[in-house]
Image (cartoon, coloured by chain):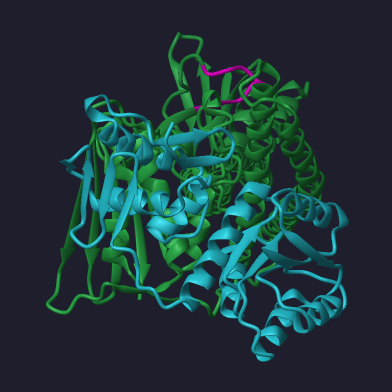
Amino acid sequence: MKLLVIEDDKTTLEYIKKGFVEQGNVVDTAENGPDGLFFATSNSYDLVVLDRMLPKMDGLAVLAAMRAANINIPVIILSALGHVDERIKGLQAGGDDYLAKPFSFQELYIRATILVERHSASNKTNGPATELTIDNLVMDLVGHKVLRAGKELTIQPKEFQLLRYLLEHQGQVISRTLLFESVWDYHFDPKTNVIDVHVAKLRKKLEANGESQLIHTVRGAGYVVRTL
Amino acid sequence: MWLERFRIFTRTSIWRFTLIFTLIVLLICSSILALVYEFTVGEQKRQIAQQVTITAQGFADLSSSPNMTTSDFQTAIQQRVKRSGAVILVFERKEQNGDVKVVGNLNTIPKNLSEFPALQHFPIAVVNHLDKTTVEIVLGTRLNTRFGKLSIALFDNNYQVLENNFRTASIVALLFALVVTLISGFLLNRRMLSKVQKIGELTAHVKAGRLKSRLPISTKQDEFDMIAEQINQMLDEIDDLINSVAQVTDNVAHDLRTPLSRIRISVEDSLKTVDENSVDGQWRLGLLEEIDQLISTFNAMLELSRLEKGVQENSYGSVNIETLCHDVIDLATPLAEEKNQQLTLNIKTDSTQPLSMVRGEPNLLFRAIFNIVDNAIKYTQVEGNISLTCYISTQGAEIIVSDNGPGISEEYYEAVFQRLYQLDSSRQGEGFGLGLPIVKAIIELHGGSISMSSSNPGLTVSITLNQ
């Protein structure tokens, strides 16, 4: 995919650029608001990573100008201001996601790919999936059933959502914060092992009767669903 | 209780001053009375004694005159008695035949009467004009002349009564002075004590963390107002200092975040060159986790300051408290299950049209309530009970988290809400004492209140949110 990163801190800019380039993406960069807006309006991108505080023109102003120019590509706002009000302001201004600094590149990358996927999916006409599968696990989204090796598992509503989110992003490392935000729809860092406990419970159910491990822990990053 | 109050009362310095002051007043009163006595009654008494002495000396001179005869001396006595009835004279003379002749206005000289110049008080019986016999006190002396014994005396009675009255009056005056000083001392003491107690209450408040408490200042501008003003100023300064310390910590946290981010980036970057499962890789991952912990602590400090500044954002909307409580329970249940604890939710409504909507920020409120429940789970023993009760009324909501764990001592109920306060040093590193202050700041930002009480045994945390 092709991205635009608007960020005034050179270290962070290089870090983001390097990360995306390593994953095989094309990255344009801008170090201030007006330049960023110029790039965004004159080229077509799949995603914009926008810093909240920029010289010459504030990040939110850039975003507002982009939306006014009918540029509806996903935008992730980065900010040192992690406060919930700031997040709301960012989302109200038309941002699609908000990430507080400092962040891990993993986190940014996952959020970016999810946003791009969602954006391109909404542009296509094929309906939503009714079934998700991995290995011998089948998730029936219509009947709200989970089958492992043909046997139905008793799964709580939140566990169902958790599994669904992980399966929808098979092979991607999902951070605890992202899981919490997506499944519980609250935005803050719970700072406890609560997500781990939920995942452990779900994992135990999936791996009952000696079935193979599907949810894997990635230390320092989060969880990933994959065979092996 | 009463005895204890009395003991406190009598230990005060004001009470000691009162006692000393009373003693001084009594001393001054007694000295004044003594002086007055000396110049009035004393003077009169001295004059009488002087008169007796002069009269006695006169007769002594008369008797020692060489050409004085017994009959002449006797005549002189009789004339003196006639001339002044107030002077009592008795002359006893032994006749040659052994009879005793008595001349004067008394029938005998009292036995053991002191000899001149010594004076002595003695009683005499007097028949007044109503034929009544009364006992009067006289001051007199005995003169041994060559003609016989002579007693000279003057009435001292009036002055004796005066002296008695004076004594009674003095005792009454002194008692009055004693009572008045003690009562005024008592009242003064009570006033002072109440003022001192106000200062004591204030220091207790400040100790409990209510740094905004101040002493009342009256318009009298007395010494207590001066002290109160100074204490208030001191507290203002302490408050300012604490705020500036908070500001400095904020700045430090803010400034440290950027280099920390760079360290984090470098460490994360370096992970790409090593196998994550190698010793080196594991070490780097551990480092990353430590950095993340550090960053999240700094973030919490900064966030707390923002919350404490308390600007209510217009981004707030309506929050359904009932749904919020269900969500908290949903999230926390596996944590309680891990410790075999019972986690229960009770929603109670006390009117037909309860108002489960509260104006606020759902993420913040969720976080606050979850934090309290999470703490209860963390500090309650295995197989304990934790309940989340939500009372919803038309006025707002009350959320009560109660557990049967070890609880905390009452004296820490306010202190645990203070920034960086750690109840138990062994819990260090686990949140750095920022959890409860953030909860409190969130609740106060929403115009609510939070308090702790004992659930015998255990801890009960009550949150009140108004519409």
Residue range in magenta is B113-121
Please provide percent x and percent y for residue B364.
47, 61
**For chain A, what colour was chosen?**
cyan
- Viewer-proximal residue, A218 or B42? A218
- Viewer-proximal residue, A228 or B91? A228
**For chain B, what colour was chosen?**
green
Quarter of the figure that contains the N terminus of chain A: bottom right
Please provide percent x and percent y for residue B255.
81, 50
Left-right relation of B53 to B112: right
Instruction: Give the residue drawn at x 45%, y 9%.
Output: B97
Determine the image quadrant of residue A65: bottom right
Query: Can you see residue B68?
Result: no
A208 vs B454: above or below: above
Is residue A108 rendered magenta in the image? Answer: no
* Total numbered circles: 0
Instruction: Give the residue drawn at x 55%, y 38%.
Output: B431
Left-right relation of B387 to B268: left
Instruction: Give the residue drawn at x 48%, y 22%.
Output: B109
Is residue B115 rendered magenta in the image? Answer: yes
Quarter of the figure that contains the C terminus of chain A: top left
B94 vs B13: above or below: above
Determine the image quadrant of residue B221: bottom right
Please provide percent x and percent y for residue B247.
75, 55
